[in-house]
Amino acid sequence: MPEAKIPDRLDRLLTDFFRPEAAPSSLTRRVVAVARKSEADFLRLERSLAIQATPRGV
Amino acid sequence: MERDRSLMERVRRGDEAAFTELARRYAARLLAVAGRLLGSRADAEDAVQRALLQCYSGAAGYDPRWAVSTWVYRILTNICVDELRRRATRTAYDQRAGAGAVAAGSANHRPPGAYLDLHRALERVPREARLLLALRYVNGLSYGELARIRGISVNTVKSQLARGKSLLRAELGRRGAGHA
C-alpha cells in the first residue's frame, strides 16, 4: 500500500482478516480442465459450422 | 519468475501452460477477495472459476496498457457484484413471499472466532466500500489501481475507503472490540 500512512490497529486487523489462504490445487486443476473442454467444444462447433468453398459454390 | 504481461501474451496465443500458471498465481488472492465478499466458500470458488475462465476466453480483449492484476480483479469484482445483486433480488423476493430469507452468504461461512466482530461489522459496510476494502487489504492495491478496477475516480476510492473504515471503527467500538 504505497499511499498508506502508518498502519493503525484497524489496518493491521484488516490485513490479517483479508490475508489469502492457499487456494486448493483442485481449483486450478478444475479451471484448466473446464477451459480445455470449452476450447475443445468451441473447435468442434467451429468445425461443424465450417463453410467450405467448392467448384459448385459455397 | 515470468512477468504477468508476458504470461498474458502467451495466454492470448492460447498457451494452456501459461493459463495454468496465471490461474495458480492469482487463485489464492482471488479466492480471498471473493470469499470475504460472498461469504460462502463454494460461491467464492465458483466466482473465481468463472473469473479465470473469462480471462482465458476473453484474453484477446486484454489491453496490455493495463496491469494484468487490474484486469483480473475487474472481472472478478464484476462477477461478485452480479452475484450480490442476484442474492439481494432473491432475498427481497423471499421476504415478500414470507420465506424468512437468511442473510445472504452467511450460511456456509464460519469466520474464525477472533474475526467474528470484524466479520459482522463488515456486513454493515456498504457493498462498494466493502469491495474496495477487500481489494486493498488482500493485495495492497494502490488507489489508482482500485479506481481502474472499479471504473471510478481516485477521490471516490479514497472517500469510500475512509467511509468504510469509519463505519467499521464505529461498529467495532459499539461492539466493544476497541479497534478505533
Image: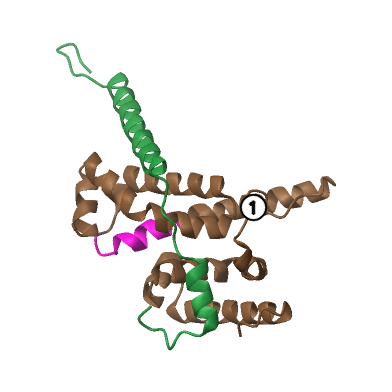
Residue B132 visible within the image: no
Q: Quadrant of the C terminus of chain B?
A: bottom right
**Residue B12 percent location from the top left of the image:** 23, 46
Relative image position of residue A29 (x, y in whole percent): 36, 38
Count of numbered badges drawn on the protein:
1
* Residue at the extreme left: A55
Judging by the rendered image, the residue that carries numbered circle 1 is B105
Is B46 magenta? The answer is no
Secondary structure under badge 1?
loop
**Crowding at label 1, few (<14), some or many (≥20) Cα neighbours within 10 Å?**
some
Point out residue B63 in the picture as x, y percentages from the top left corner: 27, 58
- Where are the magenta residues, as a range? B64-76
Question: At label 1, which amino acid type do we have?
Answer: Gly
The N terminus of chain B lies in quadrant: bottom left
The single residue placed furthest to the right in the displayed view is: B98
Which of these two is toward me, A22 or A35? A22
Residue depicted at 38% across the width and 78% down the height: A1
Q: Is residue B120 left or right of residue B147?
A: right
Query: What colour denotes chain A?
Result: green
Q: Residue at x 76, y 48 (%)?
A: B93
Chain B colour as displayed: brown
| Front position in the image: B77 or B179 | B179
Color style of the picture? by chain
Assign the magenta stretch its main secondary structure: helix
In the image: residue B20, left or right of residue B137? left
Task: Give me the chain letter of mark 1.
Answer: B
